[in-house]
Image (cartoon, grey):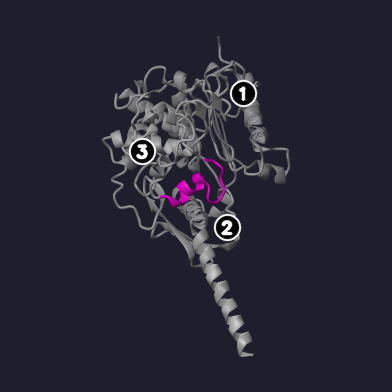
Amino acid sequence: MRLALRIVAALLVLVVVALVGGYFYARPLLETGTGYAAHNSCAVVLVAGRDDPDSDLPDNPLVPFLTGYVNEAGRSSTSQILFTLSTQKAWYTRGFGCTVGAERPTDLGEATKVVPDTNPLSTAESPEPDAAVDAAIARAFGDGLGAERAAELGTRGIVVLKGGQLIGERYAAGFDRETPQLGWSMSKSVANLLVGRMVHQDRIAINDSELRPEWTDEKRAITVDQLMRGTSGLTWDETYSLGTPITQMLYSEPDMAGFAASQPLAHQPGSYQQYSSGGTNILCSVLTDLADAPDADLPRQQLFAPLGLTSATLEVDATGTPVCSSYLWATPRDWATIGQFALQDGVWAGERLVPEGWMASSTTVAEVRQSEEQGYAAGWWVNRKPDGTLVKPDLPEDAFWASGHDGQRVYVVPSADLVVVRLGFTPELEPAQLRTDELVAELVALAPAEG
């Protein structure tokens, strides 16, 4: 009997040791899940002003095991597994959004005040009804599909500009013109505009190399342009799963750019194109090192204030570096303003803010030995491939767009003087099922530009 008890006790000890050991082995992976949940809750409630973070952004596979809460008075959010394990916190700072970290960031500096004076869209009246435009927008919202399929489509906001004027606008229930929405990787296109601002001020050149002090090996050859275009050659995996580099960077690493910069080279710089959020965050760390402003304030000082983007919040990591790959929140109208700024080649309120021809070069695909992408240029997706064929045959050759996770889009069509913004939550459908390409094609056909 005593022997049996000893065996049971020994087995229990082994089970406990295995469970504890297994937890500590898996802890880094689990913390990407709790970090995501903490950031999600913080941003949806405290940045976007909404109250249902569990349904506002993509699912987390740990949801059945997660517990957490948002402390609105304390401007923070906490997430953990089964009330105690792998705890992560996210901290809200006005102007700079939510940051995952053990402690609240204390050295972000003061956020530059942004006023709407230069942004006519901020105060524009709702557009006069236009039957054709409104019908095209209705199809993009899934009208006529039935409630279940329309919900699957998940469109939350559409804004259409023609000649810089608001001609179409609609929002889903629970959203309106004042609701900031997350652009995910559309932030990369904004990072391109930030580079343009710094180039225009002669603080950086696109062919500059030796960008990080720790890059003393072959990484020294990586250039600004290669970071924008995804041709740095650094090892990366953009798959959104627990424990991949992209999720580890976004939800577990206090210094996102440092983490991405530490990845080994997989290819000679400039020879291979691979989409990389890590590269974009390295890029923004380079920009902040050159700026006069505190790191966190660079986007507000250089872009949001000149364009009057009062709703725009580009969140930062624990070092204060903007997460330029993924974390820009803005209202659909402010996203449309960004598109119009790009359409005008960086001229705003009569002032040139990026070099002349910046958008033409940024929306030209560079020829590389091998690419995993179709039509990816310098932070923007473009319709014309290097061989002259079109990525989207139904759209004009000169169309280009910002693209983000779950169906975020800002389309710019210079030949039609058109900007189209679509924001939503579409995790279950393929990009081709979003109805956004069809929306843009319909709007181009409705009112083609003269000449």
Q: Is residue 17 visible?
A: yes
Q: Position of residue 140 (x, y in %)?
A: 65, 34
Q: What amino acid is at disc 1?
A: Val
Magenta-tinted stretch: 237-253
Q: Secondary structure at mark 1?
A: loop
From this view, report whether residue 37 is shown above or below residue 168: below
Disc marking residue 182: none
Q: Residue furthest left?
A: 292
- The answer to whether the residues at label 3 and label 2 have Cβ atoms under 8 Å apart is no
Q: Secondary structure at mark 2?
A: loop
Q: What amino acid is at disc 2?
A: Leu
Residue that numbered label 1 is attached to: 391
- The answer to whether the residues at label 2 and label 1 have Cβ atoms under 8 Å apart is no
Residue that numbered label 2 is attached to: 62
Q: What amino acid is at disc 3?
A: Ser
Residue that numbered label 3 is attached to: 285
Observer-nearest residue: 7 or 103?
A: 7
Q: Position of residue 82 (x, y in %)?
A: 54, 67
Tell me: 294 left or right of 157. left
Q: Position of residue 195 (x, y in %)?
A: 38, 29
